[in-house]
Amino acid sequence: MKTAIQNLTPAFSIHPGAMILDEILANDYTQSSLAKKVGMNKSQLNETIKGKRDVNAELAILLEAALGLPAQYWLNLQNQYDIDKAKVENKAIERIKAIKDFSKVESFIPKKYLKKQCIISGDPMKDLPKVYDVYKVSNLEGLISEYQSPQYARFKQSEKLDVDKTNLIAWVKFSEYTAKDFEASKFKPEVKNELVAELRKVIYENKDVHKRVRAVLRQYGIKLLYQQKADKVPIDGYAFWSDDNPTIAMTLRHKRLDNFAFTLFHELGHIFLHLLNDKSKEIIDLSNSDNDFKKSKEEVEADDFALDHLIPKEKWENFLLKSPISESMIREFANEIGINPSIIFGRYCYESKKYNFKTTISHVIG
């Protein structure tokens, strides 16, 4: 504890002259009377009291004789003042540097979003190292390099995608940062079928879905994060590795159970099909991604994984052979395969383009 206190930087330094003035007042002296007593000009003593002159060994001995306080006491005060002054001046230099460095960093980070996440507070001395920690860099050059990473090349500003690249990178980095403190069991890919079965049951029952899905995934070694969305970042999901655990980050932009379930299983598809043997891989899925990305092999495979694990392919094809499709048929089929009817209904409307289908089936997440 002693060492920690010694390392603290005082808010300001106190010159021994302030203590001389206290003693003058306490003993009903005047500056003139004390100056005469120690053989100084009043102006010299006044400069010492104002901190413009130091207390040297000679003055310390004279003050001991005049005020009764040991000479070492006055020398210790002067020594501590010199140390504190040096610390305060050094701290000011550090702060000036932090202010200048943070002003350079500002163009590469979204201050509004990071402030909401309590990453920045307005104090550059605290904010700069925190930002570097979130972005996993050690300096401005590293931050610029991260910003220019090929990972984000397809998100360059354009009217077509309407994606704020700066916000997107911050969301991704904050998700990775948050995942570090999220604990999960050891990941065992061989129990995929058991995992899928449990998730389907939770979705079927539609009760405390967000909480229960996260608990199930944690049990099977997959981290699931629900992250607040950032402006102009219409992200559906992000699949990546956090230490030894595959991780999914979602924004919960959609309030529909079928949207949530599809996004969840889509990201699971990325984990089991694409991340399993490549811990460096990161896949960002935006709802309005360009067609080239949507038609990429990885995205098509993840879509198929989601579709087939939510509704078995053969059963779905047989269901579509029935005509016309009614709400009662949808509910009966949902009970037959053990999935919530909103999943059947949502997919049927999407594939048939019959969005005006009248139904009492609820899409609300329970």
Image (tube, rainbow, N blue to C red):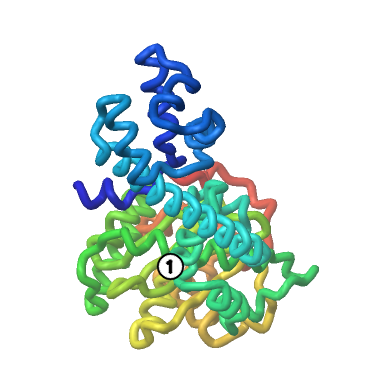
Q: Is residue 236 left or right of residue 4?
A: right
Whether residue 9 is visible: yes
Identify the residue position indicated by label 1 in the image: 265
Residue furthest to the right = 159
Residue furthest to the top = 28
Q: In this view, does 64 lie to the left or right of 118?
A: left
Q: Identify residue type, mark 1.
A: Phe
Percent position (x, y) of residue 332? 42, 54
Whether residue 255 is visible: no
Foreground pick, 33 / 227: 33
Q: Is residue 256 left or right of residue 189?
A: right
Percent position (x, y) of residue 132? 48, 66
Foreground pick, 153 / 35: 35
Would you identify the image quadrant in which residue 57 lies? Answer: top left
Would you identify the image quadrant in which residue 71 lies? Answer: top left
Percent position (x, y) of residue 307? 47, 71
Q: Residue at x 65, y 72 (%)?
A: 289
Q: Which residue is drawn at 60% across and 57% down?
A: 99
* 283, above or below 326, in the image: below
Q: Which residue is drawn at 40% across and 20% down?
A: 24
* 328, above or below 282, in the image: above
Foreground pick, 354 / 148: 148
The secondary structure type at the circle numbered 1 is helix
Q: Quadrant of the C terminus?
A: top left
* 217, above or below 68, in the image: below
* 287, above or below 212, in the image: below
Q: Which residue is drawn at 26% across and 29% down?
A: 69
Percent position (x, y) of residue 196? 32, 67
Number of other residues with Cα within 10 Å of mark 1, as a class: few under 14, some 14 to 19, many 20 or more: many
